[in-house]
Each structure stands twice: as structure tokens, then as C-alpha cells.
């Protein structure tokens, strides 16, 4: 029994109407033409991360992303396993491992 993919594609289960979803902002559109037009309004990914060069459509996305870089704690104590953002924090921490 042949399945018409275009009938299944982009149809919301809760809706009897065919809808097209913008994968950038999650807005819904009733026709693919209006979705097309809408997507063009997003333009290109204008905001890029200065750390990893990853690109984003929205400043808010970029801001949320950059946060993940700032939360990174690359300096890990080999004695107690605590991690720190800056090396001097690691050096200054009171570590029982260092007393041995
Ligand atoms: Zn959109
Ligand atoms: Zn990044
Ligand atoms: Zn330690």
C-alpha cells in the first residue's frame, strides 16, 4: 500500500490542517510558500561565537551558547578532582591532597 509522503510530512497530529514549521523560530505556516518567505526574513546566521566560530540566527541563542564556554573549568586538581575556571583558583584552593 503506497504511502504518500507529502501527506504525512509536516502535518501536526493535533491539527487537521497542513502546517509548515520554521526550524529556526518554530513558527507555523499554512503554506510552504509563506514558510519560504518567512525563512528568508531570518536571513543568514549573523551572530557567530568568538570562541568556537559557531553561527547563530539570534543574539539570544549566541548568548546562551557563549555561556557554556564560560562555564568550562579546564583546570582540574589531580588530588581532589575539583575543577576551576582559572589556574590561580586551582592553585589557591585548600586541598587536602597537597598536605600529604
Ligand atoms: Zn522562523
Ligand atoms: Zn562557541
Ligand atoms: Zn585539590
Image: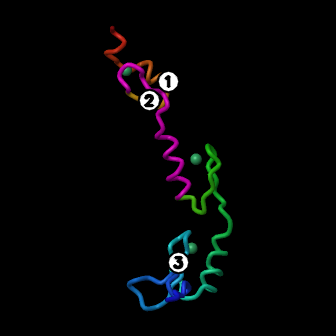
Residue at the disc numbered 3: 21
Q: Residue at x 44, y 18 (%)?
A: 91
Image coords of residue 43 (percent x, y): 67, 69
**Residue closer to the observer: 58 or 16:** 16
**Residue depicted at 50% across the width and 40% down the height:** 70
Kindly give the residue lying farthest to the top in the view shown.
100
Residue hosting label 1: 87
Helix, strand or loop at disc 2? strand
Question: Marks 1 and 3, Cα distance to the nearest angstrom?
Answer: 46 Å
- Across and down, in percent, residue 80 comes to 35, 22
- Which marked residue is nearer to the observer: mark 1 or mark 3? 3
* 70 inside magenta stretch: yes
Q: Of 2 and 78, which appears nearest the observer? A: 2
- The reply to whether discs 2 and 1 touch (Cβ–Cβ < 8 Å) is yes
Residue that appears at 44% across and 23% down: 90
Indicate the secondary structure of the residue bearing disc 3. strand
Residue at the spot 56% in from the left edge and 54% down from the top edge: 62
**Residues shaded magenta:** 61-81
Amino acid at each position: 500500500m503506497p504511502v504518500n509522503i507529502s501527506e504525512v510530512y509536516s502535518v501536526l497530529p493535533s491539527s487537521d490542517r497542513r502546517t509548515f514549521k520554521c526550524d529556526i523560530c518554530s513558527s507555523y505556516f499554512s503554506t510552504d510558500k509563506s514558510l519560504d518567505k518567512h525563512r528568508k526574513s531570518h536571513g543568514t546566521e549573523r551572530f557567530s561565537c568568538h570562541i568556537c566560530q559557531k553561527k547563530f540566527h539570534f543574539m539570544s541563542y549566541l548568548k546562551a551558547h557563549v555561556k557554556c564556554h564560560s562555564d568550562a573549568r579546564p583546570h582540574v586538581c589531580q588530588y581532589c578532582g575539583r575543577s576551576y575556571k582559572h589556574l590561580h583558583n586551582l592553585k589557591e584552593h585548600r586541598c587536602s591532597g597537597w598536605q600529604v
